[in-house]
Image (cartoon, helix red, strand yellow):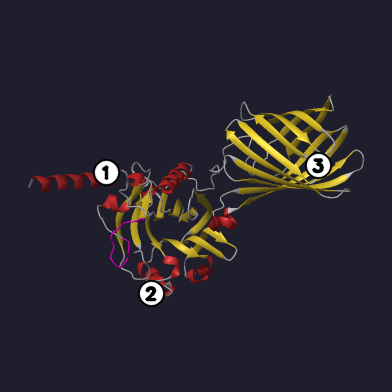
Amino acid sequence: MLRLKNYLKLAVFLFLLQIATPSQAMNVPSLTVKIMTLNLHNGKDMAKQPNFARLNQLIATEQPDIIALQEVQNKHLSRLQVPGYRMISGPNANYAFFRFGNALLTRHRIIYHRHHYLPSRREQRGVDEVALDLGGQSLRVLNTHLGLGHKEQRQQIEELIRIGSYLPGPVLLTGDFNLEPSHWLLEGFVFQEVSMAVGNSYKTFPAWNPAYQIDHIWYSPHFLPLQAQPVAWDGSDHLPVIATLTLVEPGGYNAELVAIPDLLLAHNPLLPDIGVYPSRLEVALTVDQSQLNFHTGSLEIPLLQPLGFKVGYHRKTTELALTYHHNIDLRDYFSLAGIRSKAEWNLSIFGNNKGDFWVEWSQYYRWNDRWGNKLTVTGGADKPDLAFEQIFLPTTQTRIIVGYDTDSHWQAGLAYTPDQQQVWQVSYSKDDLAKSYQLGWEYRF
């Protein structure tokens, strides 16, 4: 009897609150989102037969607003053209004729989408970030597929947290985590998992005898989950999971593209970042045949990226150059081969006050925070010259560099940086005719 009275009091209170503030209630539109996540098993069911027709039937039956898929090949995208849905894809594993990753279908307008690679040790993994406009309300969906090893899973979860920290407003995170939501790696995760919130414990893998819940839907505090459950379906080795959530903090969020610093960039002038073109001033003094000479001075300024301008002084000659930079993420082409680096190709057209012109093409590869290579080809009136440099950082403030070119000229140098802008370097070089010592200083601004 006491409990009934309490319910009646609560109902009266809510009714009075609603009629007391009608304008406020009318200004907050109700928004409910139905989202599904599914590992598509590379487009095959357990009998290794195509599952796209059954997927279309599943979508027609459930009518979700958002469908997050994992294990999707690029060649399958044409079979995922569902009437009434827009689609984006983000391949993680790439070869020239094989691209494999995630895809997302939605009924709503896509504001933007982009792909982020996740730290990976085995197969390359990634996360797709999609901003949606749901009738004037905006939200972001992150769709991912984590790796299998705990070390890479921890790094991938940390990267998801880092990416999420840059995204204001409502966020839904979906995917195949290869972890149960109660796993210790997910303790203190910044998002909430729908099944844990609604108190509906279920399993999703393997589909024929589910024993693990590894397919997740997570949400930011802007949402209130209403329900979540798997769907009985034999089209994959995973069961699809569908959740319904209400946006309890609508409006006022900017869904424009937010700059997120690249995880591979750990700024250090000793090992230049790919795609970062600071202005730089370089000065070098040379001891050549017991004489001290002002050897080289140059100033390089980015104009309108990827274009730049360089003016220099080299052995009593003034030089001018127009430079062009092109960035390549090698994971876009060779991730299945375990290559995780980035490359920067630079093309420079030089001229000097003596009327000479030549072209320089350099390729710089940054493999990690310790190693880098540079290959330079110079062509002009003389025969082409090919130079190779190996860069290694034993510590974050010291660099060892060894180089060799086709003119039998080699050099070795040691550099030190006291901060994020200056580099001091001493080097020794030798060819068939002479040897020299050089002291150089570089400042980046």
Say if 57 sits above or below 86 in the image: below
Indicate which disc residue 321 carries: 3
Drawn side of residue 293 relative to residue 255, left or right:
right
Q: Residue at x 70, y 29 (%)?
A: 425
Q: Residue at x 61, y 48 (%)?
A: 342
Report the Cα–Cα distance between label 2 and label 3.
62 Å
Indicate which disc residue 205 carries: none
Q: Nearer the viewer, residue 120 or 373?
A: 373
Q: Residue at x 51, y 60 (%)?
A: 89
| Helix, strand or loop for the magenta stretch, by majority | loop
Q: Position of residue 66 (x, y in %)?
A: 42, 60
Q: Nearer the viewer, mark 2 or mark 3?
A: 2
Report the Cα–Cα distance between label 1 and label 3.
71 Å
Q: Farthest front residue?
A: 432
The three-letter code of the residue at mark 3 reads Ala
Precedes in sequence: disc 1 or disc 3: 1
Q: Position of residue 208 (x, y in %)?
A: 30, 68
Residue pointed to by mark 1: 17
Q: Nearer the viewer, mark 2 or mark 1?
A: 2
Residue pointed to by mark 2: 47
The three-letter code of the residue at mark 2 reads Ala
Q: Which residues are magenta?
A: 204-215
Q: Is 219 inside the magenta-drawn segment?
A: no
Q: Look at the image and tell me in which quarter the C terminus lies.
A: top right
Q: Farthest right residue?
A: 354
Mark 3 falls on what kind of element?
strand
The three-letter code of the residue at mark 1 reads Leu
Q: Are marks 2 and 3 in contact (CB under 8 Å)?
A: no
